[in-house]
Amino acid sequence: MGAARRNPPRRSMERNVAASLVFKTAANTKVAMAIAVANNQGYDAVEETLSITIDGADVPFSELSDHHGGRFHYLEFTEPSEVSVDYRATVHGLGEPDASSPMELIRYVRPSRYAESDRLLPTSYAEFGSLQGAELLHAVRNWVNGELRYVSGSSRGTDGAVETLLHRKGVCRDFAHLAIALLRSKDVPARLAAVYAPGLSPMDFHAVAEAYINGAWHIIDPTGLAPRESMLRITAGRDSSDTAFLSTVGGSLTLKTLKVSASVNGELPVEDPRELVSLR
């Protein structure tokens, strides 16, 4: 395989992202929300606002730190409430590539709830044989892209990689879960990242896989729906159970509306699936 063409560094990249949500809670509901851009010391500057209101009145919240710079905003509602959320951020420059501890590399090679790598081990070895490193990443990306059809609303929240492979269709998180499971089956640490993805259509929160090879984390997006170089990390974890943008830790809620936007100032990067790209 020849050397992959690389886009030139884009230190001056400016990305603009936003998310607007309206949800209705039951009484005594606790909410964890992950919509803010992850902390990264490498950015030149981050300008952001977060408004959470009920009938125009501000709602108190706390910010909790998660793995890989992720930030969760935590709220508690004693009474049934209709909550409006508006988040906006402009990120200047590129972040530093994410590092990993030995414990993280162990965690991300284990089977997990939605990435059942133990059950897909025979499939992974049958399809990818002795492939390693970048060659394995490209092969897994292309195989998942070729085996699955992207169909909005086609999967259930309980579907993992095995169900996705059986149904041969899914949405971005399903594509990512299958890629993660196949890579872990080959002893490659892999995890799911929730991202803002300029160029994505239809626009939404996006899920991609990250794999650790050659001492660094690299993005795999089997959907091929957006250029990886301009993606912005929100959260990362074992699978989507760690990265949901909205979840309850007591009580219940109903999401009424969701609108996401993500763009770059200038032209989008040219996507080359063969290129090794890190979330920056």
Image (spheres, rainbow, N blue to C red):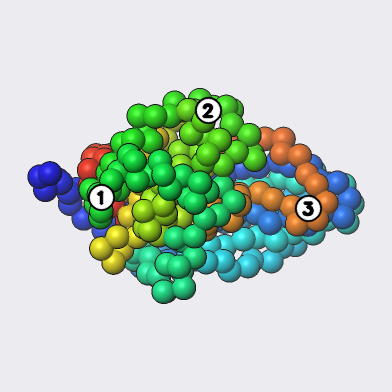
- Which x, y percent locates residue 11? 26, 58
Horizontal side, residue 55 vs residue 108: left or right: right
Q: Circles 3 and 2: CB distance less than 8 Å?
A: no
Question: Regarding mark 3 in the picture, which secondary structure is present there?
Answer: strand
Query: How many residues crowd mark 2 within 10 Å: few (<14), some (14–19), many (20+)?
Result: some
Q: Looking at the picture, which amino acid does disc 3 mark?
A: Ala
Q: Mark 1 highlights which residue?
A: 130
**Residue 57 image label:** 3
Q: Nearer the viewer, residue 239 or 206?
A: 239
The residue depicted at 48 percent of the width and 50 percent of the height is 117
Q: Nearer the viewer, residue 182 or 72?
A: 182
Question: Given this view, does label 3 or label 2 mark the residue nearer the observer?
Answer: 2
Q: Looking at the picture, which amino acid does disc 2 mark?
A: His
Q: Residue furthest left?
A: 2
The alpha-carbon separation of the residues under discs 1 and 3 comes to 59 Å
Q: Nearer the viewer, residue 256 or 149?
A: 149
Q: Looking at the picture, which amino acid does disc 1 mark?
A: Ser
**Residue 79 image label:** none
Q: Is residue 256 above or below residue 30?
A: above
